[in-house]
Image (tube, rainbow, N blue to C red):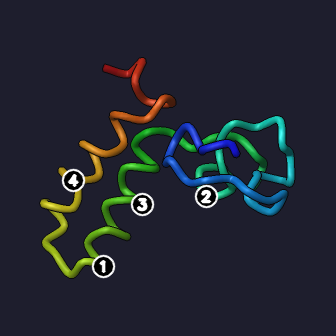
């Protein structure tokens, strides 16, 4: 099973891949409509918003948490 390099999501079916392209190493949630991968800043904002809403915490705390999580993933390691 492949894991998304940008968010860590398990990719277990064709529908998990952007444009159903199994050659991609990132998931549909980390892709733009054209299939290209989103930037770190785009994912950071999305993850932080989702985390804040799902866990009912302040956005600044969610943003820090999202940063800590994302920077450990393969797509973003070269950024540090």
Residue shown at 49% from the left, 48% from the top: 7
> Is residue 53 shown above or below 9?
below
What's the mark number on residue 53? 1
Residue shown at 13% from the left, 60% from the top: 61
Q: Which residue is mark 4?
A: 65
What's the mark number on residue 31? none
What's the mark number on residue 29? 2
Please say if the residues under marks 4 and 1 sit with CB atoms less than 8 Å apart. no
> Picture coordinates of residue 49 (x, y %)?
33, 67
- Left or right relative to 11: residue 40: left
Alpha carbon distance from label 4 to label 2: 19 Å
Please say if the residues under marks 3 and 2 sit with CB atoms less than 8 Å apart. yes
Mark 4 surroundings within 10 Å by alpha-carbon count, few (fewer than 14), some (14 through 19), many (20 or more): some
Alpha carbon distance from label 1 to label 2: 17 Å
Secondary element type, mark 2: helix
Alpha carbon distance from label 3 to label 2: 10 Å
Residue shown at 68% from the left, 42% from the top: 2
Secondary element type, mark 3: helix
Residue shown at 38% from the left, 59% from the top: 47
Mark 3 surroundings within 10 Å by alpha-carbon count, few (fewer than 14), some (14 through 19), many (20 or more): some
> Is residue 64 shown above or below 37?
below
Q: Nearer the viewer, residue 17 or 48?
A: 17
Q: Which residue is mark 3?
A: 46
Secondary element type, mark 1: helix
Alpha carbon distance from label 1 to label 3: 11 Å
Please say if the residues under marks 1 and 2 sit with CB atoms less than 8 Å apart. no
> Which mark is first along the chain, 1 or 4?
1
> Which mark is first along the chain, 2 or 1?
2
Secondary element type, mark 4: helix
> Is residue 56 shown above or below 4?
below
> Picture coordinates of residue 22 (x, y %)?
84, 43
- In front: label 3 or label 4: 4
């Amino acid at each position: 099973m492949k894991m998304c390099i940008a968010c860590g999501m398990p990719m277990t079916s064709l529908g998990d891949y952007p444009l159903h392209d199994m050659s991609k190493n990132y998931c549909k949630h980390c892709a733009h409509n054209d299939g290209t991968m989103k930037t770190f800043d785009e994912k950071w904002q999305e993850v932080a918003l989702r985390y804040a809403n799902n866990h009912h915490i302040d956005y600044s705390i969610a943003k820090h948490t999202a940063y800590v999580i994302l920077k450990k993933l393969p797509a973003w390691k070269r950024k540090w």
